[in-house]
């Protein structure tokens, strides 16, 4: 986990993990940039065996976006259902109103 800690990066660690790293983790300074040469060697080896890095990144990005949209839409459906169960509704602009037409991800 600590190998992924670097300046100007986004932290998505659960709070308990972050606390454990803070309590007894050892973070190597410049843990990412210090290994650029090694990383390039891995990418070169992957290319030699036919792995297209750009394609891998594109597929992961597309799948990540799709999973985010699915989760977001499921959250919206759950909240809308709970509001309807309580006799309330929310409009697409966040105001009270019809629960239908609320915010969705991916234009769905």
Image: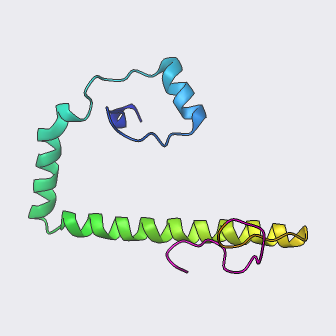
Image-based side of 1 in relation to 73, left or right: left
Q: Is residue 72 left or right of residue 57?
A: right
Residue 98 percent across, percent down from the top left: 76, 78
Rendered position, 23 above or below 15:
above
Q: Residue at x 10, y 55 (%)?
A: 44
Please tell me whether residue 71 is drawn above or below residue 43 in the rendered image: below
Number of disc labels: 0
Q: Quadrant of the N terminus?
A: top left
Toward which corner of the image does residue 60 lie, by quadrant? bottom left
Image quadrant in which the C terminus is located: bottom right
Where is residue 20 drawn, in percent x and y? 54, 26
Residue at 18% in and 31% down: 34
Quarter-of-image position of residue 46: bottom left
Front residue (pair 33, 25): 33
| Magenta stretch, main secondary structure class | loop
Query: In terms of depth relative to the viewer, which is nearer, 39 or 48?
Result: 39
Q: In the displayed structure, would residue 26 be above or below residue 17?
A: above
- Image location of residue 101, percent across then percent down: 66, 79
Q: Is residue 107 magenta?
A: yes
* x 54%, y 71%: residue: 105
Magenta-drawn stretch contains 92: no
Point out residue 56 in the picture as x, y percentages from the top left corner. 27, 66
Please, which colouring scheme is shown?
Answer: rainbow
Residue 18 falls left or right of residue 27: right
Residue at 73% across / 66% down in the picture?
Answer: 95
Q: Which residues are magenta?
A: 94-108
């Amino acid at each position: 986990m600590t190998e992924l800690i670097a300046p100007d990066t986004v932290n998505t660690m659960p709070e308990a993990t972050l606390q454990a790293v803070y309590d007894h983790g050892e973070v190597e300074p410049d843990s990412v940039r210090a290994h650029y040469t090694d990383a390039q060697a891995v990418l070169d080896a992957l290319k030699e065996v036919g792995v297209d890095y750009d394609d891998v990144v594109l597929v992961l990005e597309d799948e990540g976006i799709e999973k985010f949209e699915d989760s977001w839409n499921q959250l919206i459906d759950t909240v809308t259902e709970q509001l309807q169960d309580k006799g309330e509704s929310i409009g697409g602009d966040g105001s009270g109103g019809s629960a239908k037409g609320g915010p969705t991800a991916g234009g769905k």
